[in-house]
């Protein structure tokens, strides 16, 4: 995966999180043709860029804290 492909996928992940549609990391990993660990790294990178992403255990979704 090239840098531009990775950034594009990270932006799509951010879109899913903003619209409260990211719950199953395995499904996203299959769609991106990568591992669940890679998806977790992408979420970590988004957090390092300043996004306040948290996981809600009640709804089992990743959310963007305002």
Image: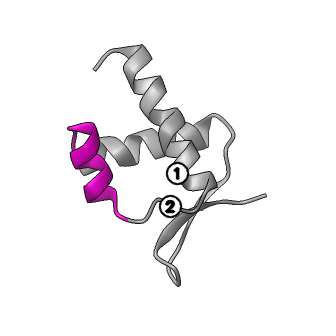
Report helix, strand or loop for mark 2: loop
**If the image is split into quadrants, where does the N terminus sit?**
top left
In this view, 36 is above or below 4: below
Say which of 65 and 16 sits in front. Answer: 16
Q: Where in the figure is residue 39, as x and y percent of width and height?
A: 35, 45
Image point (38%, 21%), residue name: 5
According to the image, label 1 marks what residue?
16
Count of all numbered marks drawn on residues in the image: 2
**Residue 25, disc:** none
Range drawn in magenta? 24-35
Image point (63%, 53%), residue name: 18
Q: How crowded is mark 2: few (under 14 residues within 10 Å), some or many (20 or more)?
A: some
Image point (63%, 34%), residue name: 49
Which numbered disc flags the more N-terminal residue, 1 or 2?
1
Name the main secondary structure of what is drawn in magenta.
helix
Color theme of the render: one colour
Say which of 24 and 42 sits in front. Answer: 24
Q: Where in the figure is residue 51, as x and y percent of width and height?
A: 67, 44
Q: Which residue lies furthest to the right in this view?
A: 66
Report helix, strand or loop for mark 1: helix
Say which of 44 and 23 sits in front. Answer: 23
Image point (26%, 50%), residue name: 36
Q: Where in the figure is residue 11, as x and y percent of width and height?
A: 53, 34
In this view, 65 is above or below 52: below
Q: Where in the figure is residue 46, as x and y percent of width and height?
A: 56, 39
Spatial CA distance of label 1 from label 2 is: 5 Å
Q: Report if the CB atoms under discs 1 and 2 are less than 8 Å apart.
A: yes
34 within the magenta span = yes
**If the image is split into quadrants, where does the C terminus sit?**
bottom right
In this view, 4 is above or below 64: above
According to the image, label 2 marks what residue?
21
In this view, 24 is above or below 11: below
């Amino acid at each position: 995966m090239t840098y531009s492909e990775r950034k594009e996928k990270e932006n799509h992940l951010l879109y899913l999180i903003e619209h409260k549609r990211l719950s199953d990391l395995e499904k996203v990993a299959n769609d991106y043709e990568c591992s669940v660990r890679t998806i977790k790294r992408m979420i970590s990178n988004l957090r390092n860029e300043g996004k306040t992403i948290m996981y809600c255990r009640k709804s089992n979704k990743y959310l963007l804290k305002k």
